[in-house]
Amino acid sequence: MIDSASPIVASPAVSPREERVGMLLVFLSALMWSFGGTIARFITVGDSWTVIFWRSVWAAAFLVGFMVWRDGWRGTLKLFRDMGLPGLAVGICFATASTAFVVALAYTTVANILLMQAGVPLLAALFAWALFRERVGVATWVAIAAVITGVAIMVSESLDGAVSPIGDGLALLIAVMFSVATVITRRFSGVRMTPATCLGTMLAAGFAVSQASTFAVSVSDMGFLFAFGVVNLGVGLAFFATGARLIPAAIAALLGTFEPILGPIWVWLIHSEVPSGRTIIGGAVVVTALLVHIGLEFKRQARPERAGVTGVPSPN
């Protein structure tokens, strides 16, 4: 929980166009993150901490370069100085989640991790409502329920009871961290969160230094680690940090569920792993729920305001 003594940054008004841009950016972040499992399949390094180190280093390098290109050196340093406790909290959340993801793969299946992550929309909505009384509409709750149902169908074949409590605990930790980061980013929308996510990758790399048994990797593995850090993590974090400031926490987390939907598709296309019938059915449920919900949001935003409603003055 953020210290009540920390300064509260007022959230600027978000226009319908900005909200649409936010939705697109958060979707693109999920798209980038969805390549994680496929890229990880190519990496032959046995030490998870070595993977965490190089992935985080490449992601941090990308994010620093992105901020310097966008804001210059002085602007970048100012962003780090000004992010405050909310930015630090988001950085810790991302460091914890990205580290837990790689380590969890050594203890449990990807299916179990994805099922836990499917709870992010519900957790984010609950945290936003409980902490900040952020309103969550009925349509969003229905869509969240549909998403969780669809992902549960997809991974149900893998839930045979032979699971590691360590792996499932780490998977649950990932879901909680992403939920908290989503809520904080939305609540403190006046704060630039890109440096916070960059800080998260630095924290993860710093901790991995103390745990890794070796930093030597093959040329091919380094190429995949570069993609794992820059494409999957760095670009995804930049998109998420920018877009999540513009939309409600529940919708941001809902769009994020494209990650567990698209992930199996990339594995199928690249590694020739054919999805099961339940995966196809569950994916159809989730994608339908997302498209219907987003369509309703666009329709709501495009509807002209009536006189005397939502602040529009009446003719008299």
Image (cartoon, grey):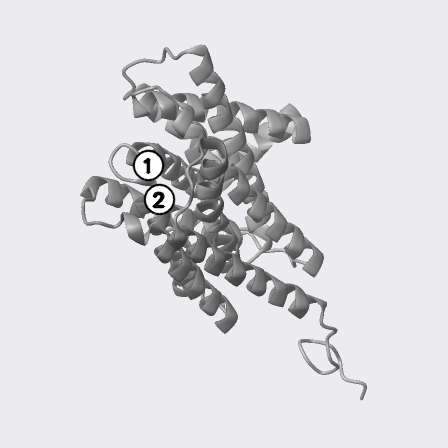
The residue pinned by badge 1 equals 100
Q: Position of residue 286 (x, y in %)?
A: 47, 58
Q: Position of residue 128 (x, y in %)?
A: 44, 60
Residue 96 visible:
yes
Residue 275: image quadrant is top left
18 or 214: nearer the viewer: 214
275 or 256: nearer the viewer: 275
Give the number of the disc on residue 174. Answer: 2
Give the number of the disc on residue 258. Answer: none
Residue 315 drawn above or below residue 127: below
Q: Is residue 304 left or right of residue 289?
A: right
User: Which residue appears at 40% of the width and 53% of the height?
Assistant: 277
Q: Quadrant of the C terminus?
A: bottom right
User: Which residue appears at 64% of the width and 30% of the height?
Assistant: 75
Are the residues tagged 1 and 2 within 8 Å (C-beta)?
A: yes
- Classify mark 2: helix, strand or loop: helix
Q: Position of residue 96 (x, y in %)?
A: 35, 37
- Classify mark 1: helix, strand or loop: helix
